[in-house]
Amino acid sequence: MRLLKTALVAGALAVLSVTTIASAYAQDTKIGFIVKQPEEPWFQDEWKFADQAAKEKGFTLVKIGAEDGEKLMSAIDNLGAQGAQGFIVCTPDVKLGPGIVAKAAANNLKLMTVDDRLVGADGKALEGVPHMGISATKIGEAVGQAIVDEMKARGWKADEVGAIRVSYDQLPTAVDRVEGAISVLKANGFKAENIFDAPQAKTDTEAALNAATVVLNAHADIKKWVSFGLNDEAVLGAVRASESVGIPADGMIGVGIGGADSAINEFKKPAATGFVGTVIISPKRHGYETALNMYDWVANNKEPEKLILTSGALAKRDDYQKVRQGLGIE
Ligand code: FCA
């Protein structure tokens, strides 16, 4: 009898400790979200939506900005030391791919990437790492189409127009975006020799402004310009450069990619600028959904899809609020 009682108590204790562990586990889920440019509105929006997922599911989200490889590597070690189980990253340099994978494994952290896909030593995508990015070529084509449509509306002929390709060619998604735009320009009569490369040292407005200024000064005879790049900041740089060399707003057609505050603030200006539109992409999908997918992986052992590519929608000064509402990001 006594023996039976002891066994029952032990059994109950065992059950108790299992549930205690299970609930402690749910409470302790910790997920990192590392971004390469924390000051960029796009990344702030991603964090905002990732926070929403954390609140809903009750996990801890650790947001870290890592502008270079060294900061990124120590951020991963830091997450490991804090007892995180996984992280999502938009890396400052996709070529760090194999190093990031190794660091994550050494810290026993699950790894997903967002926006910028890791590449291996051979320059090919690391397909084993789950990734959410934008459909870069398609979105670039939408940029090109928006530019062509605006050229037609203004009565511009392709051979009197110069194009600024604000470029960041070490990043594959950036190449796909600008090449998508160029393919549409060319299909509409744009000659290759009228498209000028403006390589930016960093993916921000200042670097784009510097790069675009060089192009504009080298081709001062051209009075009508279009510009495109990997994001809104790139195109805003080209637009600011055109203003600084005295090209009026109706002499520039810039179309960006993003649709976060960088673009919205431009649309809110009382007078229209050369920044005529942006293809709005979804920080909600890239922030909320990636965080949720990582949570499901950590807490429920549900592996995320290996590749998710999201779409975009063109918006201009007069309809951006509606487009944002449609994407559920207003
Ligand atoms: C890259 C760009 C960002 C954003 C993101 C989707 O990381 O640098 O500005 O466009 O892709």
Image (cartoon, rainbow, N blue to C red):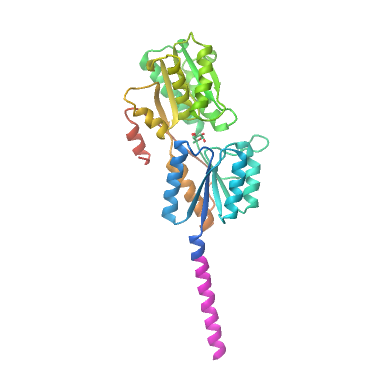
**Residue 126 visible (yes or no):** no
At 54% from the left and 79% from the top, the residue drawn is: 11
Task: Identify the residue at the far top of this view.
Answer: 221
Using the image, determine if residue 315 lies above or below residue 227. Answer: below
**Apparent side of residue 246 relative to residue 4 in the rendered image (left or right):** left
Q: Is residue 105 above or below residue 36?
A: below
Image position of 55 with respect to 138: above or below: below
In magenta segment, residue 62: no
For residue 226, side relative to residue 153 (left or right)? right
Q: Give the camera-side residue of 313 and 93.
A: 93
- Please tell me in which quadrant of the rendered image residue 56 appears: bottom left
Q: Which residues are magenta?
A: 1-22
Which quadrant of the rendered structure holds the N terminus?
bottom right
Name the residue rendered at 34%, 22% in the picture. 272
In the displayed structure, would residue 312 be above or below residue 153?
A: below
Left or right, residue 75 beside residue 319: right
- The percent position of residue 195, horizontal first and vertical second, equals 52, 17
Residue 274 point in image, percent of width and height: 40, 21
The residue located at (38%, 39%) in the rendering is 327
**Where in the figure is residue 183, as x and y percent of width and height?**
51, 22
Question: Residue 95, percent across and down?
Answer: 63, 36
State the residue in front, 263 or 57.
Answer: 263
Q: Residue at x 46, y 23 (%)?
A: 144
In terms of secondary structure, what is the magenta stretch mainly?
helix
Q: Is residue 20 magenta?
A: yes
The number of discs equals: 0
**Position of the C terminus by quadrant:** top left
Looking at this rendering, what residue extends furthest in the right direction? 121
Q: Is residue 199 among the parts visible in the rendering?
A: yes
